[in-house]
């Protein structure tokens, strides 16, 4: 598949890891009065241009990790220890306005339920245009032109017509492509894909994953692929972090992981997909 660059990529040249998660703990209150630790002592770095897969079963803490990186742990959960640093900014210490300026522009997330993400009363063009106007300061006409370019980049059929379509007029695969276009609209330096294709047909899933990888690579961005499917990490990631009961129990290069998994849980996951 040929790589298609998105409009106006943002260059990043600073040294050091793009993202650093250090000793991160996230807790949720329990009706008994005690706290339940959803994440315990997470340490993870993401280099510029690197794709890291985070794998584990449902309930392992994958989505909580993604939300913690964004600084959006759902209440009443909270970060109780550790910190997340993105491009030198400590996300866990930022005020809401400063964090919102980063989210969607430099750091974005793709979720698995595109219809739940899209406002049913806004057209596709309005969804993408609103992000472009807010983060890139484009006027309405320029935002519409850029939105059309983005729909072409994510290979939406008949993009001119889809620009004025509403979410209910899109197939699941097209809705996911629109969400990807929104997430990549400002050429973020880090994209988090949270099981983003899990609800799609296998063929469509493969197409969208190939597209997402190509767009991320073309723009020299980094990515975290959160998934329950180890096969996804084998084809799209440089390293794999295995999350079990809120802890990273194994972290290795893809080749090393598949050749010589070390942790019993990793071996069990591989056996389940063999």
Image (cartoon, rainbow, N blue to C red):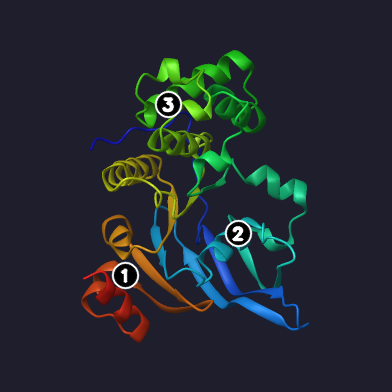
**Disc 2, disc 3: CB below 8 Å?**
no
Mark 1: few/some/many CA within 10 Å (<14, 14-19, 20+)? some
- What element does badge 1 sit on? strand
Residue 235, percent from left and from top? 26, 56
Is disc 3 surrounded by few (<14), some (14 to 19) or many (20+) residues within 10 Å? many
Q: Position of residue 69 (x, y in %)?
A: 59, 60
- The residue nearer to you, when weighing 132 against 274, is 274
Q: Residue at x 60, y 59 (%)?
A: 67
On the rendered image, what quadrant is the N terminus found in?
top left
Which numbered disc flags the more N-terminal residue, 1 or 2?
Answer: 2
From the image, tell me which residue sits under label 3. 151
Q: Is residue 204 left or right of residue 196?
A: left
171 versus 253 height, above or below? above
Q: In the drawing, what numbered circle is on residue 110?
A: none
Given this view, does label 1 or label 2 mark the residue nearer the observer?
A: 2
Residue 74 in the image, given as x and y percentages of width and height = 68, 60
How many angstroms separate mark 2 from mark 3 (CA)?
Answer: 27 Å
Tag 2's secondary structure?
helix
In the picture shown, does residue 116 fall above or below 144? below
Identify the residue at image location x=51%, y=17%. 164
In the image, 165 versus 80, the foreground residue is 165
On residue 67, the disc is 2
Number of dots carrying numbers:
3
- Image quadrant occupied by the C terminus: bottom left
Q: What residue appears at the point 54 percent right and 70 percent down from the top-left corner?
A: 61
Crowd around label 2: few <14 · some 14–19 · many ≥20 (10 Å): some
Marks 1 and 3, the one that precedes in the sequence? 3
The residue at which mark 1 appears reads as: 253
- Vertical relation: 85 (above or below) 105: below
Report whether residue 263 is seen.
no
């Amino acid at each position: 598949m040929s790589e298609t660059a998105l409009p106006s990529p943002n260059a990043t040249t600073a040294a050091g890891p793009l993202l650093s998660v250090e000793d991160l703990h996230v807790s949720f209150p329990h009706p008994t009065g005690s706290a339940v630790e959803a994440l315990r002592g997470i340490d993870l770095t993401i280099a510029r241009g690197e794709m890291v897969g985070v794998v584990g079963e449902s309930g392992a803490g994958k989505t909580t990790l993604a939300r913690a990186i964004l600084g959006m742990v759902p209440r009443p959960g909270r970060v109780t220890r550790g910190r997340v640093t993105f491009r030198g900014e400590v996300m866990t210490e930022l005020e809401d306005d400063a964090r919102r300026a980063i989210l969607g522009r430099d750091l974005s997330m793709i979720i698995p339920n595109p219809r739940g993400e899209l406002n049913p009363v806004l057209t596709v063009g309005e969804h993408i245009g609103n992000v472009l106007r807010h983060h890139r300061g484009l006027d309405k006409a320029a935002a519409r032109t850029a939105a059309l370019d983005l729909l072409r980049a994510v290979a939406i059929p008949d993009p001119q017509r889809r620009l004025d379509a509403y979410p209910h007029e899109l197939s699941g695969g097209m809705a996911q492509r629109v969400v990807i276009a929104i997430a990549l609209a400002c050429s973020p330096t880090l994209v988090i894909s949270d099981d983003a294709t899990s609800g799609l047909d296998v063929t469509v899933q493969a197409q969208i994953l190939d597209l997402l990888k190509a767009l991320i690579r073309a723009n020299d961005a980094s990515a975290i692929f959160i998934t329950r499917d180890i096969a996804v990490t084998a084809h799209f990631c440089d390293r794999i972090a295995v999350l079990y009961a809120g802890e990273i129990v194994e972290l290795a290069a893809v080749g090393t992981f598949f050749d010589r998994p070390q942790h019993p849980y990793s071996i069990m996951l591989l056996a389940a997909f063999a």
